[in-house]
Image: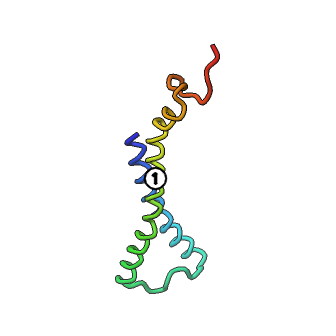
């Protein structure tokens, strides 16, 4: 479970930077004018900071998703105590 949690958080970081790369590539290939012609160091630093601020809510969604996946088995044991052994939502017919 820990591997899954860390991999989803790392995946969200990669998706953020992959999205930025795709934006740059699409803008340069199709000349959409999304990026300025001349970029200074301060503009680039400000853009990276803003990108990180925008990606934080996405990271929080991933953390909530991971917490939900952790809590699901315990929640099912509380809500359906008769299915503890099988793990299925219905009783097994013998």
Residue 75: give x, y in percent of width and height. Answer: 49, 38
| Residue that numbered label 1 is attached to | 64
Which residue appears at 54% of the width and 31% of the height? 80
Q: Is residue 10 above or below residue 72?
A: below
Quadrant of res 44: bottom left
Residue 33: give x, y in percent of width and height. Answer: 57, 82
Front residue of 26 and 91:
91
92 on left or right of 35: right
Q: Residue furthest right?
A: 93
Residue 38: give x, y in percent of width and height. Answer: 44, 86
Q: Is residue 33 above or below residue 81?
A: below
User: Label 1's element?
Assistant: helix
Quadrant of the rendering where the C terminus is positioned? top right
Which residue appears at 53% of the width and 35% of the height? 79
Front residue of 51 and 79:
79
Front residue of 27 and 74:
74
Residue 21: give x, y in percent of width and height. Answer: 48, 67
Quadrant of res 56: bottom left
Front residue of 68 and 37:
68
Q: Is residue 79 above or below residue 19?
A: above
């Amino acid at each position: 479970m820990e591997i899954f949690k860390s991999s989803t958080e790392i995946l969200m970081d990669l998706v953020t930077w992959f999205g930025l790369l795709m934006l740059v590539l699409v803008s340069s290939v199709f000349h959409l004018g999304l990026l300025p012609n001349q970029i200074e160091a301060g503009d680039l630093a400000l853009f990276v900071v803003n990108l990180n601020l925008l990606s934080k809510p996405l990271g929080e969604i991933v953390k909530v998703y991971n917490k939900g996946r952790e809590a699901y088995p315990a929640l099912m044991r509380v809500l359906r105590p008769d299915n503890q052994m099988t793990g299925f939502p219905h009783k097994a017919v013998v």
